[in-house]
Amino acid sequence: MDNRKILQDFPKVELGFSPTPVVKLTNLSRHLGGPEILMKRDDLTGLALGGNKTRKLEYILGDALAKGCDTVVTAGAQQSNHCRQTAAAAAKLNMSCHLLLGGDKPDEATGNLLLDTLFGAQLHYCKDNRKGEDIPRLIEDLKSQGRKPYVIPYGGSNELGAIGFVEAGLELATQIDTDTLSQVFFASSSGGTHAGLMIARSILEHQYMLTGIQIDKAESSAGEFKQSVLALANSTSDALNLSQVFNQEDVILDDGYLGAGYGILNEREKSAIQLLAKTEGILLDPVYTGRAFAAMLDKIGSGELVSGQQVLFWHTGGAPSVFAYADKLL
């Protein structure tokens, strides 16, 4: 049975390269002396130096084009991978792009911010409002100019974005024997990747533990983020006409590695980035994958993950932001 048939009713535009490879981190696994470590290389999706948001945007922008929209609007931090890939996708599809970014305009554009500019996005600096709080006002302005705007939620995490990762989870099962996996780790921030992988795992009836490492401290209070992942998983399951209903126990979210907060690099994350670069020649980013990978390494070091097991790290991309953190990584 081709499980991907459940996705065929949703318009999709091809933006990246798939399937992305799964590789063995042989040198690192030997160095650590723990489980065999695999990596799903979604940093190689192709669009704008790669990243997981390409998968989400293929369905989100498929919907935008189907609705006749000519402008996309989204929001994020200044080093947002989502904003960078949205800007590139808009350029590829001949759409205008407006990005609402947190903070003030910097003196110099580096990393993802530089790429946003090269892709022709119009940048709006919104101080503390990095999650789209100012979007409604911009939408009214664009409509008054005769534009047909399409709003992409923070991180591209709605049902359409999550469907992109349902497809990704199904893709993984065509590449490796997932029955041998003990655990899959990934950075969990806006929820779409997490929700989509939960659904794919359920469809395939796989038993591996799916562990999201929480990235953003602002979402940590009272389990709000966990609840939002759960709600998105269930609404996406419903959109796909699946019978699966998830509960709180299905959302595995580790909030023990938040450090000083979002985008603040600590020594554990710095060491993880350096170790992977030196052993495998693979780059992690300082905000998302660096934090999540450091968490996985900590669990290996503590003996929670041991020799004889097999784990997979889902690399969601973000390498361009390395250049914006040069002074903190060296």
Image: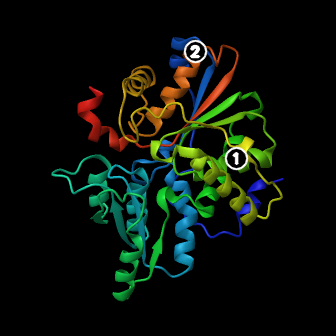
x and y, in percent, of residue 223 in the image: 60, 45
Q: Residues within 10 Å of mark 2 (few under 14, many from 20)?
A: few
Give the distance between the C-alpha atoms of the residues marked 1 and 2, in whole angstroms.
Answer: 26 Å
Q: Earlier in the sequence, mark 1 or mark 2?
A: 1
Tell me: residue 330, above or below residue 145: above
Which residue in the rendered view is the most extreme toward the front?
A: 222
Identify the mark at residue 198; answer none if there is no mark. 1
Residue ID at (74%, 59%): 237
x and y, in percent, of residue 305 in the image: 64, 19
x and y, in percent, of residue 288 in the image: 45, 40
x and y, in percent, of residue 193 in the image: 59, 49
| Camera-side residue of 212 and 278 | 212
The secondary structure type at the circle numbered 2 is loop
Residue ID at (62%, 56%): 162
Please state if 267 lies on the left or on the right of 33 as rendered.
left
Q: Residues within 10 Å of mark 1 (few under 14, many from 20)?
A: many
| Camera-side residue of 235 and 127 | 127
Please state if 201 lies on the left or on the right of 165 as rendered.
right
The secondary structure type at the circle numbered 1 is helix
| Res 28 seen here | yes
| Camera-side residue of 87 and 151 | 151
Say what amino acid the circle numbered 1 marks: Met
Q: Disc 1 vs disc 2: which is toward the camera?
A: 2
Query: Residue 260: which quarter of the image?
Result: top left
Say what amino acid the circle numbered 2 marks: Ser
| Res 177 seen here | no
State the residue position of label 2. 302
Asked if marks 1 and 2 touch (Cβ < 8 Å), the reply is no
Query: Residue 262: which quarter of the image?
Result: top left
Residue ID at (61%, 54%): 228
Tell me: residue 142, above or below residue 269: below
